[in-house]
Image: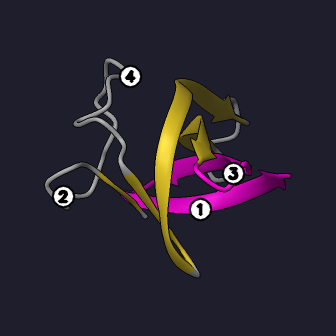
C-alpha cells in the first residue's frame, strides 16, 4: 500500500492523477518514498470483456536505494517488480 504524508492511502483518478504525494510504501516494513514516476495506464485485453484488465502502474524509489514497479487495480496496490 502507498500512503501520503497524512497516512492516507494514495489512489489514482480517472485522469491519472495521484490523490496525494506518495510518502510511504508499506512492504514488509514501512519504506520512505524519495521519488516516483507515473502513473501510467494499462488496459489489457480490452477486446475480450471477460478477460479485460485495467490498472495504473507507477515506479517508486525508496530511501534504501531500491525501486518498485507498483500497480493499482481495484483500489489495491501490488508489487510487480523490485529493482535493487
Q: Earlier in the sequence, mark 3 or mark 4?
A: 4
Image position of 63 with respect to 29: above or below: above
Mark closer to the observer (4, 2): 2
Magenta span of residues:
63-84
According to the picture, the residue beneath numbered tag 3 turns out to be 51
Q: How crowded is mark 4: few (under 14 residues within 10 Å), some or many (20 or more)?
A: some
Marker disc for residue 8 = 2
Element carrying mark 4: loop
Is residue 67 a member of the stretch shown in magenta? Answer: yes
Callout 3: few (<14), some (14-19), or many (20+) C-alpha neighbours within 10 Å?
few
- State the CA–CA distance, disc 1 to disc 3: 19 Å
Q: Where is residue 74 in the image (x, y as percent from the top left)?
A: 41, 57
Q: In which quarter of the image is residue 81?
A: bottom right
Give the residue drawn at x 66%, y 60%. 79
- Of circles 1 and 3, which is in front? 1
Residue lying at the far right of the rendered structure: 84
Name the mark nearer the viewer: 3 or 4.
Answer: 4
1 or 30: which is nearer to us? 30
Residue sitting at the far front: 64
Q: Estimate the x, y position of residue 24 in percent, counting from the top left.
A: 40, 57
The secondary element bearing badge 1 is classed as strand
**Is 25 displayed left or right of 41 in the figure?**
left
Q: Residue furthest left?
A: 6
In front of the other: 47 or 57: 57
Q: Residues within 10 Å of mark 2 (few under 14, many from 20)?
A: some
Amino acid at each position: 500500500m502507498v500512503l501520503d504524508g497524512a497516512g492516507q492511502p494514495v489512489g489514482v483518478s480517472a485522469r491519472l492523477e495521484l490523490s496525494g504525494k506518495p510518502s510511504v510504501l508499506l512492504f514488509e516494513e514501512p519504506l520512505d518514498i524519495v521519488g516516483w514516476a507515473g502513473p501510467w495506464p494499462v488496459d489489457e485485453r480490452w477486446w475480450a470483456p471477460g478477460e479485460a484488465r485495467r490498472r495504473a502502474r507507477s515506479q517508486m524509489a525508496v530511501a534504501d536505494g531500491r525501486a518498485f514497479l507498483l500497480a493499482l487495480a481495484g483500489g489495491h496496490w501490488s508489487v510487480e517488480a523490485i529493482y535493487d
